[in-house]
Amino acid sequence: MLRRTSHVKLLTVNNVVFSSTLQIGDSQFVDSTSHAIAILQEHNHFSPLNEDEFNLHPIFYYQSPCPVIYEDVKMDTINDNPKINVRTLDILAASTSSLIHIGNSDHIRMSNRLKNLLKYDKNPDGDD
Amino acid sequence: MIYHVTNKGLNIGDIKVRIISTSSVLLVGDVRTIQLSAAFDTPPDSVIYGPLVPVGPKS
């Protein structure tokens, strides 16, 4: 068991947005995922994004590159000083499924998939 | 494999961070295992030509 305690005297966070987490205290398991499509198009006609759009691009359905942990590593920790001291922690923003964690955790898994798209009305190279 | 760790004192002054973005972690503490993955696809490979068909919910 991880037994060190974290001490932060002053914590300042301005923004926590888009499914981000500010966790104060220990946790067992954190699993965070972010899927995003960013579209740039020529004209300013907004159309709502179909959820199926996520199934059109392989980036969203190929297998996660997270390796399987199979190594049997025995970890033995000696804590000479059972405290982690931080005087001040100043954060402007946490965004898109990110995590600010003060305290111990057993396992953390974070994943992000982002697809950028450019949409032209016609081929800018003039081929067709 | 046996992995020995001895944690001596850890005292930090001031941490100033602008932005923690897209599935990133800022951790003040200990963790046993951590896995991070990111996939990013950007033009020119993802250029789409042709008349713009509005994508809307299925009817």
Image (cartoon, rainbow, N blue to C red):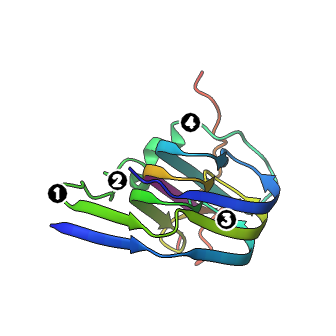
Work out whether A43 lies above or below B45: above
Residue position marked by numbered label 2 in the rendering: A64
Residue position marked by numbered label 1 in the rendering: A72
Q: Residues within 10 Å of mark 3 (few under 14, many from 20)?
A: many
CA separation in Å, label 1 and label 4:
40 Å
Q: Secondary structure at mark 4?
A: loop
CA separation in Å, label 3 and label 1:
32 Å
Q: Could you tell which of marks 2 and 1 lies nearer the N-terminus?
A: 2
For the point 63% across and 64% down, the residue is A122
Residue A17 spot, x, y in % from top left: 74, 49
Segment tinted magenta in the rendering: A108-116
The reply to whether discs 1 and 4 touch (Cβ–Cβ < 8 Å) is no
Q: Amino acid at mark 1?
A: Asp
Q: Main secondary structure of the magenta part?
A: strand
CA separation in Å, label 4 and label 2:
20 Å
For the point 58% across and 52% down, the residue is A36
Q: Amino acid at mark 2?
A: Ser
